Image: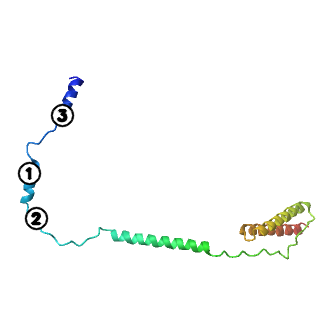
Amino acid sequence: MNEFTWRRQLRELRQPLSPPDDLWASIDRRLNQLTPLPVAPPAVQIEPRGTRRRRLLGVATLAASVWLCAGIGWRLLRPAAAPAPVVESAATPVSWRPADPRLAGASIELDAARMELRQALQQAPHSAALQRLLSRAERQQARLRRLGREAG
């Protein structure tokens, strides 16, 4: 069989075909023979299992979200506590020069660091990090003085 024959057979298949019996007439006749079903009273609607639990879970989730947003808003709008002011220690003189040259170099470095930290605190007085660094430098300077007393 060649392609020409196949195409001719395909063209013949495109013709409309009518069924041997009229189907709609028999369907209509059967529908008319049926007796109508009695109308039942409206049934009580039963929710699928777990619907109430899911609804409660949704309400709880919404409440938790509102609670979280309120807490975050309260934290953001609450005024920040004022940090403790930097107090110059009376026991710590501003400049101290030990007799030991090794300690003198460290003392000069610590004095310079303290001065820079004080200048930075004047620009940002509420910076807790700068205050921590300044107190650390003062503790190191106190330790350096103690080493100077022990050395000589």
Mark found first going from the N terminus, 1 or 3: 3
- For label 2, count other residues whose C-alpha is less than 10 Å away and answer few (under 14), some (14-19) or many (20+): few
Closer to the N terminus: mark 3 or mark 2? 3
- Which quadrant of the figure contains the N terminus? top left
Please determine whether, in this image, residue 1 is positioned above or below residue 44.
Answer: above
| Quadrant of residue 118 within the rendered picture | bottom right
Which image quadrant for residue 48? bottom left
Distance CA(mark 3)–CA(mark 2): 43 Å
Say which amino acid is labelled 3: Leu
Q: Residue at x 70, y 76 (%)?
A: 82
Q: Position of residue 101 (x, y in %)?
A: 91, 60
Q: Amino acid at mark 2?
A: Pro
Q: In the depicted view, which residue is nearer to us: 130 or 28?
A: 28
Labels in figure, total: 3
The answer to the question of whether label 3 and label 2 lie on touching residues, with beta carbons closer than 8 A, is no
Judging by the rendered image, the residue that carries numbered circle 3 is 13
Task: List x then y, in percent, for residue 74.
Answer: 58, 74
Q: Position of residue 109 (x, y in %)?
A: 85, 61
Could you tell me which residue is drawn at 11 percent across and 50 percent down?
Answer: 24
Q: Three-letter amino acid code at disc 1?
A: Ala
**Mark 1, secondary structure of its residue:** helix
Of tags 1 and 2, the one toward the viewer is 1
Colour scheme of the rendered structure: rainbow
Task: Decide which of 48, 2 is in the foreground and name it.
Answer: 2
Q: Secondary structure at mark 2?
A: loop
- Quarter of image, res 87: bottom right
Name the residue carrying label 1.
Answer: 25
- Mark pair 1, 2: CA separation: 20 Å
For mark 2, what is the residue?
A: 36
